[in-house]
Every structure is written in structure tokens, then in C-alpha cells.
Amino acid sequence: MRAALAPTMLALLMGACTISPPVFEKPPLVAKIDRQRIERDNCMLAKAPQFDDHSADVRPIARRVAAACWDETEKLMTMTVPYADDRARLGFQQEAERRAADIVLTFRGVGNPADGRPGTPTPLSK
């Protein structure tokens, strides 16, 4: 009995390796989501210098920047997860705060010691 199952299992495992990549059902929606992400990032780029008090801990600044651009983040979430629950909202909020922290640190020039000047992040292209 075991010998008969082995070839079948092997065939199933081999078939699983040849699964094609996912195909999006609505490519126009993907483009809209990308544009909304760019709009959210551009909002953060505009707000980051206003909220940066140059304190050592960038997390509170990132939270304020992300909160100032919550409308853009919420639009992004609604497009991506139409029926978002609390867990999805928390995930989008945390991702926005991480992105805002990256933007603030880029403005400060952290991680670019050879330059010696604050960074100048550029908006994403549409």
C-alpha cells in the first residue's frame, strides 16, 4: 500500500513546484493602489519637516507624521482591504509609521555619513 502512494505523492509534490505566479484579477485597481501609496508618501514627505523636532527618538515624530496623513493611508487601506477589521487597521497604521520614520531619517541624512548634510528625499513618481 505504501509503495503505491509514494509515486502519487511525488507527482503531487512535483506539481506543486510548477504553480504559476499569482495573477491579479483587476490590474486597474493595482495601478490605483500604487498611485494612492505615492499620494500617501508624498503627504508624509511634505509633513515630515514640519513635525521633526530633531529629538533622538524618531518614533513619536513618525507617529505624528503618519497621523497627519491618515486620510491618505485610510484610502489606501480601503482600496486594498475593503472590509478592514481592527487588525488590518493596526497593520496599516504601523506600516505608515515605519514609512514616516524612514522619511524622517532620510531627511536627517542618517546612514549617509559621507555626505555630512541632511538628506533630501524626493517624492515618488506617479
Image (cartoon, helix red, strand yellow):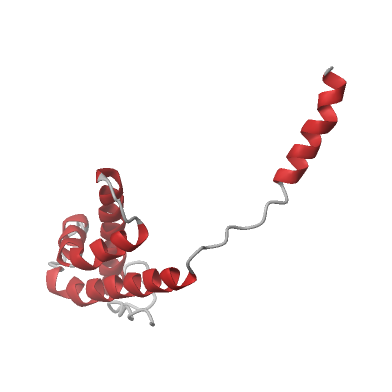
Image side of residue 22 versus residue 52, left or right: right
Residue pushed farthest top? Answer: 1
- Across and down, in percent, residue 50 comes to 13, 74
- Across and down, in percent, residue 76 comes to 30, 64
Image side of residue 80 versus residue 22, left or right: left
Image side of residue 106 versus residue 61, left or right: right
Of the pair 37 and 117, the residue shown nearer to us: 37
Query: Which quadrant: the C terminus?
Result: bottom left
Residue 37 sits in which quadrant?
bottom left
Query: Which quadrant: the N terminus?
Result: top right
Location of residue 126 with respect to 4 vertically, above or below: below
Residue at screen point 24% across, 71% down: 44
Of the pair 27 and 34, the residue shown nearer to us: 27
Residue 66 sits in which quadrant?
bottom left
Residue pushed farthest right? Answer: 3
Residue pushed farthest front? Answer: 25
**How many numbered circles does the render carry?**
0
Residue at screen point 18% across, 73% down: 47
Location of residue 60 with respect to 34 vertically, above or below: above
Image side of residue 115 versus residue 68, left or right: right
- Across and down, in percent, residue 35 comes to 36, 75
- Across and down, in percent, residue 78 comes to 29, 60
Residue 99 sits in which quadrant?
bottom left
Residue at screen point 49% across, 70% down: 27
Location of residue 71 with respect to 94 vertically, above or below: below
